[in-house]
Amino acid sequence: MTRWLALLIIGALVVFGVNGCVLVVADENVAQEVREDKHRSRLARDIARDIDGDESLMDSDISVREHDGVVTLRGEVDRLSSLQHAIDIVARHPDVETVISHLTVEVEF
């Protein structure tokens, strides 16, 4: 229903020639991510970008928090080597004093 309403509004804007209007339709998860990112420090955002951009960590789900140079990682990785790699990415940032890992490794038997 929300998407149809959004399409109707966009169609009306196009038909009536309204300029300079932006309509963003997103689900609740996107809104939560935007709120969390707004409160994240620059260092945490930089580290999260590095982790998200690392090809070997693409299958991982890692969140980053930082306070006074102490970086905490939470989430799940698929291999033990990925866990160590994520920690190494964080540790190479010059403003990081301590890395705390609450990462778990998914193991299949």
Image (tube, rainbow, N blue to C red):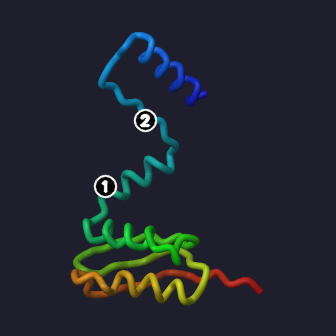
Image coordinates for residue 20, horizontal then vertical, percent: 30, 25
Q: Residues within 10 Å of mark 1 (few under 14, many from 20)?
A: few
Left or right, residue 83 beside residue 44? right
Image coordinates for residue 34, horizontal then vertical, percent: 38, 51
**What separation in Å lies between label 2 and label 1 (alpha carbons)?**
17 Å
Q: Residue furthest right?
A: 109
Q: Amino acid at mark 1?
A: Lys
Image coordinates for residue 21, horizontal then vertical, percent: 34, 25
Foreground of the two, 44 or 94: 94
Q: Is residue 77 above or below residue 18?
A: below
Give residue 76's mark: none
Q: Residue furthest top?
A: 16
Foreground of the two, 63 or 78: 78
* Residue at the image point whose x is 73% and y is 83% from the top: 108
Left or right, residue 106 beside residue 51? right
Which corner quadrant of the image does residue 51 belong to? bottom left
Q: Residue furthest front?
A: 55
Q: Amino acid at mark 2?
A: Val
Circle 2 sits on which residue?
Answer: 24
Circle 1 sits on which residue?
Answer: 38
Quadrant housing the N terminus = top right
* Residue at the image point whose x is 30% and y is 59% from the top: 39
Disc 1 is placed on an element classified as helix
> Mark 2 or 1 closer to N-term?
2
Which corner quadrant of the image does residue 77 belong to? bottom right
Image coordinates for residue 99, horizontal then vertical, percent: 35, 85
Quadrant housing the C terminus = bottom right
Left or right, residue 56 beside residue 65? right
